[in-house]
Image (tube, rainbow, N blue to C red):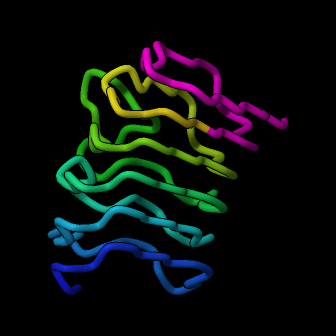
Amino acid sequence: MPSSLKSLRIINCEGLECFPARGLSTPTLTSFNLACENLKSLPHQMRDLKSLRDLTISFCPGVESFPEDDMVSFPDEECLLPISLTSLIITEMESLAYLSLQNLISLQSLDVTTCPNLRSLGSMPAHLKNLNLLVLY
């Protein structure tokens, strides 16, 4: 991918099950929208996307883990997401069981919808201005 890429949308790519092992080499990426029903894991080294501000993960019921350590959560102690995120939208991520985003110090908006296995919300960032949760079982 071009290193100057600012926005990336990967929608309804039925054949996409995983990303390359090297992850996404897009240091200027500010917006990433991902919606792929057959995707099994998120890209490696997502925390290295230092410019990423907006992340949307939707309709990815097959995502089973984060590639770094096969986790089914967003744990704050590992902080697998970039701290530059200001907006995070998670929809239809059936495997998500735990959500703790305390280390995302820039996060201002969080929207979590239809994550039926979500059992725990850990600490949230102090600067969070918008929080929308709709957990449908």
Q: Which residues are magenta?
A: 111-137
- Tell me if residue 119 comes above or below residue 54 in the rendering: above
- Tell me if residue 84 comes above or below residue 43 in the rendering: above
Was residue 21 drawn as part of the magenta stretch in this picture?
A: no
Identity of the residue drawn at 65% across and 46% down: 94
Residue 21 percent location from the top left of the image: 19, 69
Identity of the residue drawn at 51% across and 67% down: 34
Please name the predominant secondary structure of the magenta segment in the image: loop
Between residue 43 and residue 56, name the one nearer to us: 56
* Left or right side of 91 for 43: left
Between residue 85 and residue 60, name the one nearer to us: 85
Quadrant in the picture for the C terminus: top right
Residue 87 percent location from the top left of the image: 49, 44
Was residue 125 drawn as part of the magenta stretch in this picture?
A: yes
- Tell me if residue 56 comes above or below residue 36 in the rendering: above
Give the image quarter of residue 58.
bottom right
Give the image quarter of residue 79.
top left
Residue 59 percent location from the top left of the image: 66, 62
Quadrant in the picture for the N terminus: bottom left
